[in-house]
Amino acid sequence: MKRNILTIAVASAIVFVALPWVSTPTAFAQQPQGSYNESVVVKGQFTPTIEEHTKLNFPAAITDTLTRMEHTFQYDIRPTRIRALYDPSRIKAARIIGEPVTRLYNNYFRIGMGNYLTPLADLYWSSTRDRLKTYGVRLNHRSSWWTLPDHGANHFGLTDVTLFGKYIVKDILQLSADLGYEHDHNLYYGFTDSLLALRMGGLTRDDISLSDYRSKWNLASLNLGVRNMQLDANRFGYSANLRLNDLWASWYQNEFNLNLSGDMHYGFNIKDKYKGVAYLRAEWDGYYHTFSPDADDVSLPLGYTALPPDSSHGARNIVKINPYADFMLNGLQIHAGFTAGWDGFTANGDTVIFRLFPDLVVSKSLLHDAVVVSLGATGGIDANSWNTLRLINPYIAPDAEQRATRHYDAVAHLRWNFSKKLELNLEASYALLRDDVTFSLHPLYALDNVYTPHYFDNNRITLGGDITFVNDEMITLRAGGHYYHYDLIGGETQLLYRPDWDALLSAKLNYHSKFLFFLEGRLLGAMQGDSDNVLPMRYGVAAEFEYRHNRALSFFLRADNLAFQRYLYWANYPSQRGLFILGLTYTIPTQK
């Protein structure tokens, strides 16, 4: 019985194991009525293993899509926007339901009055919210109507009004225009009562009028500009500008200036890792001047001792072409190019001189951008027109000589951010200056109060720097200065009206944007003047306090020359002592 049971069990086990292998194909093929499938789940222990496979090696590639570009060190009063090479994707603006329209402050006027009968007025107004257009007006006035002991009246005044506007066409082009007028008047007051009587045959101030030694300058200007708003890399961009200036003065002078400038730029890639922009800038600066004194009615500044100067007229031009590229390569920020210049200004257009100037600046960031070191070699040509000269020295002769200054500069700069609060800047430069301009007293004016430009060649070394401390934008402290060393060339023996050093110390305090205080002290080294006269060191202290009553109304007090020094910047022209101006600023809120 036991043997039969064992035999039956073994046979049943064999049939049980073999049956699925035999019956499964038949069952799937015939699918008899009422048949069903059955699955078996086997449970047991599982040992995980990792088999060897070939390693996929794709190293990460970092593409620098945003670079900082150092621009040329060439000075240009017209602001130029340096375009970023990275164009981020636009994020749809969020809309807040029921968001109130904010009050706009698109205007202000500032008025004040000081001692020495010194009025001040500023006015600004512009259009309000508009995505496509902006327009407005600016007005500025400064003047003084007082006298100096033994020098009489030392009046001066400056009034400037400008209309401006911008318009965007189809989100592609930006058109801009400025129309301005400036009136500037000064008195050649640099003579004493005793010198007037001695040099002018016993004349007294009662015998002369202010018109005998008053200069008036009028400047009308028009600026037109166009630029495309395509800022993408690998896209073509351009800008163009037209500037017209017409300058006329009270001493038979007229100067018309036509300036055309523009640029083209295009983005490019370097090794599919870095990006750059290539530029081509061009500028034509043209001048036409006339000087026509009337021999029968000589109206020149008081004290002219010769026959009227001859009439003169002529055209002067400067042409500059500046190709360069801004790019980043192996951690270096590079600005590389050159400037080709044609000087037809110095010789009054009779001779055109070609000059080639370097335009190279290389910068490197160190210590996680805490330190930035820059080295460069630059140069250029700058016109010393009548408009330029009168802004430097308002007491020039009507027939002032005009030349263009050429300069070649080697520069080095170090910026070190010790922290978010402390920054140090150091600079050093070596400049070769040809036809650099200073001034000397005109020998044909008996009162020693009229200047003529003096052009000379020199090599100049400049060392300087400043350190700035900022504490949460509440307190700002700054100290700095420069040292200058000149090597005169071409037989020059004296350097006139150029200090050897200057220094600055300033402090700003902003208390909860309610009380604002500014204090500044400046030192200017002694300067060599005419006739072996040395102008003593100039030291000055200026301060300003402002109380903001609210966003629309504030009051201010300005003070200058708090050291009460009667300093001289030009020989025989002493300054007033302490100046104080009290005024207010008011803004009309605009709702739109």
Image (cartoon, helix red, strand yellow):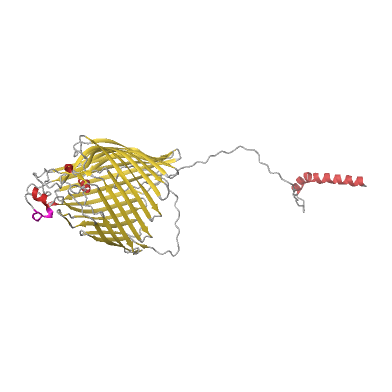
**Residue at the extreme top of the image, as rendered:** 490
- Magenta highlight on residue 53: no
**Residue at the extreme right of the image, as rendered:** 1
| Vertical placement of residue 103 versus 10, above or below | below
The percent position of residue 363, horizontal first and vertical second, equals 39, 40
Residue at 12% x, 54% y: name it: 211
The percent position of residue 483, horizontal first and vertical second, equals 29, 42
| Residues shaded magenta | 204-211
Residue at 26% x, 51% y: name it: 540
**Magenta: main secondary structure:** helix
Residue at 11% x, 52% y: name it: 193
- Magenta highlight on residue 205: yes
544 left or right, relative to 249: right
Residue 126 visible, this angle: no
| Vertical placement of residue 15 versus 115, above or below | above
Instruction: Say which quarter of the image contains residue 96.
Output: bottom left
135 left or right, relative to 446: right
Q: Which of 510 and 185 is in front in this view?
A: 510
Q: Nearer the viewer, residue 18 or 235?
A: 235
The percent position of residue 243, horizontal first and vertical second, equals 25, 48
Q: Which of 301 and 243 is in front in this view?
A: 301
Q: In which quarter of the image is the C terminus?
A: bottom left
Q: How many labels does the image show?
A: 0
The percent position of residue 23, horizontal first and vertical second, equals 78, 46
Instruction: Say which quarter of the image contains residue 499.
Output: top left
| Vertical placement of residue 158 versus 274, above or below | below
Residue 421 visible, this angle: yes
